[in-house]
Amino acid sequence: MATPENKLAFDGGWAYDPAPESTDHISLKKRYGLFIGGEFVAPENSRYFDTINPANEQKLARVAEASEADVDRAVKAARAAYSGVWSRMPAKERGKYIYRIARIMQERAREFAAIESLDGGKPIRESRDIDVPLAAAHFFYYAGWADKLDYAFPGQRAKPLGVAGQIIPWNFPLLMAAWKIAPALATGNTVVLKPAETTPLTALKLAEVIADAGLPPGVVNIVTGAGKTGAAIVNHPGVDKIAFTGSTNVGRIIQRALAGTRKKYTLELGGKAANVVFADAAIDQAVEGIVNGIFFNQGHVCCAGSRLLVQESVADEVVAKLKERMETLIVGDPLDKNTDIGAINSSMQLEKIQSYLKIGKEEGGEMHQSACRLPKKGYWCRPTIFTGVAQSNRVVQEEIFGPVLAIQTFRSFDEALAKANNTPYGLSGGVWTDKGAKIFKMTQGLRAGVVWANTFNKFDPTSPFGGYKESGVGREGGLHGLDAYVKLGAR
Ligand code: NAI
Ligand code: MG
């Protein structure tokens, strides 16, 4: 049997046949304007940029670049909708609109999933089974809170803040839009949202859904552009709250810009999570968890398990099994249902990852990659591990945001905890053990917002999410996520 290019031939000589998701059911415009005041409008300076498919470097669409004046238009539309309609509407009516968004998104789930994989490079299996269903689940969940805020904040009255400016990254484009928009709407705020410049398409599709759901014009505005457009949102005096997810560097810039203003903010930033595997763990299960923790979504995950801390007595076994498993991971076409690891999101991100591979080797780490073939076009990185690294190494301390795992060993519980906590970040962590007591001790000692036990990368709209230290400020998701969008007063 012929081995299709970029497919892995296993030892026995067989390979999976290609199983690509079709794209004939999706509709993309050649060019997208800005979604302001309930309709798509041209940017004032007529500037557009390309968004490409990182798996083949082909252009998917042209997208408007919003200037300061465009952002100002969007904020004014959001303000008018806030004062005129949305903040006055009975809460249960608001809820109905949010339910409607969720249902339309479910109806168009297949189209959303394919576009997410085309624009961002993630495997269709993930966009289909994780990103899109979870995005709809967030709208359903927060729709339910809209008329129950009195129960969310007993004895107090929760009032909306006004206009929320929201800036999101490229790793979970639709899901991040849902995380941001759903709680803002449920609490009576209006929104100006900016997707990332490499992955704007599902947010623009969401704009179409929002229009189809009949939301009053201006309640949600979606402006596209890069950092300058984001900064224009952050610095606009008419914005009452900023919600940002992205790099710690930009998070710092935003925090400085907001210092001394009345704007409320939440920041979800980077991470360098440790998966801590004790000798008494179910080893095969742990290996699956490690693989999921770092290779899921090409490691483009802020809460990725990018470090492995493994107890010395089982280290050889775990690393051997991990290497074996890495050989079976299929890297290639994001639209193929067999693909485990899709394309790296952009050439810039690939360069960043590659520079860390070089740094890791220069620092004395031993690098191992799977032997898979990579497609010729597009941006790709083989699953990679580093052993023999020290706590002070940059590949252990810094966020790489790619499929690169740094492996260290430990002997005692205290050593594991100390090493796990020894980075500037504190977003998430994982613990693998047979003993409930160790799980509780570890979860109490880890300075991380989310800790998974005997699993990894599980998300649910009811769970709050957020970081310690340089991983961010505030919580999103669940009941906590409502708090970020209200001011509380007496009944
Ligand atoms: P970034 O932080 O620059 O981009 C995130 C969002 O912020 C995008 O929408 C971008 O247009 C916007 N932005 C950029 N500069 C801004 C500014 N001055 N003011 C307001 N908004 C601004 O992230 P980037 O450059 O795409 O990725 C660089 C690194 O950041 C990655 O390698 C990764 O380590 C980390 N990252 C972390 C994420 C997370 O979820 N924690 C998500 C994306 C990136
Ligand atoms: Mg793209």
Image (spheres, rainbow, N blue to C red):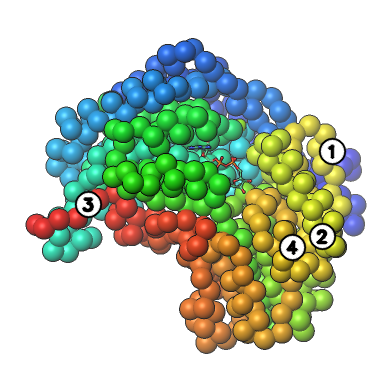
In front here: 486 or 425?
Answer: 425
**Picture quarter containing residue 92?**
top left
**Picture quarter containing residue 107?**
top left
Mark 2 is surrounded, within 10 Å at the Cα level, by few (under 14), some (14 to 19) or many (20 or more) other residues, namely some
Q: Quadrant of the N terminus?
A: top right
Whichever of labels 3 and 1 marks the residue nearer the N terminus, that label is 1
Residue at 90% x, 52% y is: 13
Helix, strand or loop under label 3: strand
Q: Are marks 4 and 1 in contact (CB under 8 Å)?
A: no
The residue indicated by pointer 1 is: 5
Helix, strand or loop under label 1: loop
In front here: 453 or 261?
Answer: 261
The residue indicated by pointer 2 is: 363
Q: Quadrant of the C terminus?
A: bottom left
- In this rendering, position of residue 306 left or right of residue 49: right
- Give the residue type at disc 2: Glu
Whether ligand 1 has any atom under 8 Å from the Cβ at mark 3 is answered as: no
Residue at 90% x, 57% y is: 11
- Give the residue type at disc 1: Glu
Residue 159, image x, y percentages: 19, 48
- Give the residue type at disc 3: Lys
Whichever of labels 4 and 1 marks the residue nearer the N terminus, that label is 1
Whichever of labels 3 and 2 marks the residue nearer the N terminus, that label is 2
CA distance separating discs 4 and 3: 43 Å
> Which label number is shown at residue 393?
4
Frontmost of labels 4 and 3 is: 4
CA distance separating discs 4 and 1: 36 Å
